[in-house]
Image: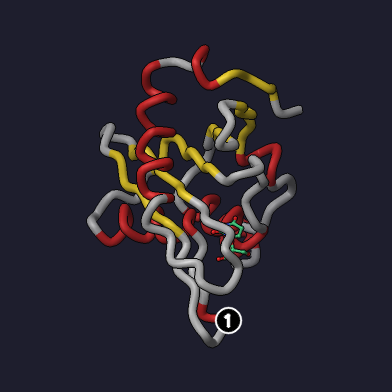
Amino acid sequence: MAERVRVDTLSADWQELLAAATAARAAAYVPYSRFAVGAAVRTGDGRIFSGANIENAAYGLTACAERVAIWKAVSEGHQDLAALALVTETGSSPCGSCRQVMGEFARELPVLIADTAGNAWLTSLAELLPLSFSAQDLDDAR
Ligand code: THU
């Protein structure tokens, strides 16, 4: 189960990642939903990439904050994700599509979900996306 924590008790690494997600959230382009999301990933070599959600008048083209952050990391040559932080007003969970994309680039991924009032929940991709489909399933069929 996700562990509820106060942001001010988190490790310096988590606080730094969450600060990056919070800063990114300020750039969310959300004229339709007004629901701003910020995300940040730490890569295996310690670098941080952040992203915000970017909506479109053709609603289906909207990009979630988590995927923007992950795509920035991967497109800069950093495919190994070590941790992800996410912040929304209410501390909501990542969508299913983003969970699947996280799984493409991480075996184990600690995930921190935070709200804007200083509450956070520590969880993991394994908890968020059990029994997931992965490259292993393709290999198993060969
Ligand atoms: N959104 C994210 O950025 N991440 C999620 O995990 C859930 C949803 C965005 C998409 C859209 O811009 C807004 O939140 C409302 O769905």
Q: In this orientation, does residue 113 appear?
A: no
Q: What residue is at 42 percent from the left and 41 percent from the top?
A: 22
Q: Give 77 or 38, whichever is nearer the viewer.
A: 38
Residue sticking out furthest to the top: 9
Picture layout, residue 126 above or below residue 29:
above
10 Å crowding of disc 1: few (<14), some (14-19), many (20+): few
Picture layout, residue 12 above or below residue 2:
above
Residue sticking out furthest to the left: 76
Residue 121 pos. (x, y %): 64, 29
Residue sticking out furthest to the bottom: 58
Q: Is residue 11 left or right of residue 101?
A: left
Residue 79 pos. (x, y %): 34, 50
Quarter of the image where the N terminus is located: top right
Q: Quadrant of ligand 1?
A: bottom right
Quarter of the image where the C terminus is located: bottom right
| Residue on which disc 1 sits | 59
Q: Is residue 103 left or right of residue 28?
A: right
Q: What residue is at 38 percent from the left and 33 percent from the top?
A: 19
Residue 97 pos. (x, y %): 61, 63
Q: What residue is at 52 percent from the left and 85 percent from the top?
A: 57
Amino acid type of the residue that numbered disc 1 sits on in the rendered structure: Tyr
Q: Give 111 or 114, whichever is nearer the viewer.
A: 114
Picture layout, residue 59 above or below residue 112:
below
Q: In this orientation, does residue 71 appear?
A: yes
Q: Quadrant for residue 43, please give it.
A: top left
Numbered marks: total: 1
SS of the residue under disc 1: helix
Picture layout, residue 58 above or below residue 97:
below
Cβ(mark 1) to ligand 1 < 8 Å?
A: no
Q: Give 81 or 51, whichever is nearer the viewer.
A: 51
